[in-house]
Amino acid sequence: MGKKRWALSVPLDGFTLSELGPIARDAEAMGYTDAWSSEVDALDAFSPLAAVAGHTNMRVGTAIVNVYTRGPSTMASSAAGMNELAPGRFVMGIGAGSQPIIEQWNNGKFRKPMTRVREMALFLQQALAGERVVFEGETFNVNGFRISRPPQERIPIHVAALREGMLRTAGEVADGCAINWLSAEDVKKSVEVIHQGARNAGRDPADVEITARLFVLVDEPSEEADTFLRRHINAYLNVPVYRAFHEWLGRTEALQPMWDAWASGDRKQAVREVPEEVINDLIIWGSPEERRAHVKRYMDAGVDTAFLQFFTAEQDPEKKRERILQAIREMSPSAY
């Protein structure tokens, strides 16, 4: 890929979408190139990008839209609409999410996630090219859909991936791969699998963009911040797909005490059992200089685009907003 890209993860904690556009415009002036949205338990993936697209010339991307919670034609229509707001600068990132999101929150079945993602990527590539699509897959069928307002520009499709199967899928069928919840050193292992998938499909591995959501704590080191981080790690790494991911990465021994405490129902002990090494591997924190150096390690390991998710333990609304804005300035490409 070409020049490395520093991006925002949106929405921003403590700010409404009506406030996001002007903040993104200022961030663009500081050198941020993109804004990438998430979709878990807050806002949908498209609304934050619409807010950014109307105020900037940033590239905007979803990281990710869930392949189970929207039907195929709705996915295509949403992508086409977003591209009209940001023509030629929208990226459609898709992924499988996790069991709680699909089964507990959306009354679905988390079945054959790798197949579902592959099939959705292939469907979207046809549908967004304006083709009449007859698609018979293992996880869904589409009979005769043709989008009536096809995008004038090609929309890149990115795939979110954790372990080998999905990483290979991204390399085989997607324009990019979104990774998260891993260390800079872990990036090398993931990227090699992505590149092998591309080579297996007869593609140039350099054509697959590697993007990463990186978690940046904007607080000064303290006991409160340490506890906040440990709770944050517990909330994610006890989800089955993320546990399996970190077992694959080789953290079973380090994280087994945390997993055991969580499984026994002792949440306080699970928080205490998060190793300091894991915190320092997975979370970017410290002084602004230390944070920027940590992001650069991800870039050096193979990340092309890093979208920074700023978060804080601060509960006071105004102080939270001040810390987030300060971190955007401190971490911007223009700051060094």
Image (spheres, helix red, strand yellow):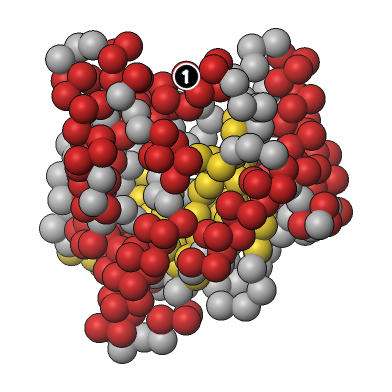
> In this figure, which residue is indicated by the disc labeled 1?
227
Percent across and percent down for residue 332 are 76, 51
x 25%, y 45%: residue: 251
Q: Amino acid at mark 1?
A: Thr
Which quarter shows the N terminus? bottom right
Which quarter shows the C terminus? bottom right
x 22%, y 20%: residue: 262
Percent across and percent down for residue 299 are 56, 64
Count all numbered tags in the image, as a single digit.
1
Q: Classify mark 1: helix, strand or loop.
A: helix
Task: Left or right? Give the position of 45 relative to 180.
Answer: right
Instruction: Report which quarter residue 264 is drawn in.
Output: top left
Q: Residues within 10 Å of mark 1 (few under 14, many from 20)?
A: some
Percent across and percent down for residue 30 are 83, 53
Give the camera-side residue of 170 and 71.
170
Instruction: Give the vertical position of 208 relative to 303 (above or below).
Output: below
x 28%, y 15%: residue: 269
Give the camera-side residue of 79 and 177.
177
Task: Left or right? Give the position of 192 relative to 253.
Answer: right
Percent across and percent down for residue 168 are 27, 69
- Does residue 226 appear in this view? yes
Instruction: Give the vertical position of 123 relative to 26 (above or below).
Output: below
Task: Left or right? Give the position of 299 relative to 127.
Answer: right
Instruction: Report which quarter residue 137 is drawn in.
Output: bottom left
Instruction: Report which quarter residue 217 is drawn in.
Output: top right
x 53%, y 47%: residue: 214
- Does residue 144 appear in this view? no
Task: Left or right? Give the position of 330 relative to 155.
Answer: right
Instruction: Give the vertical position of 237 relative to 198 (above or below).
Output: above
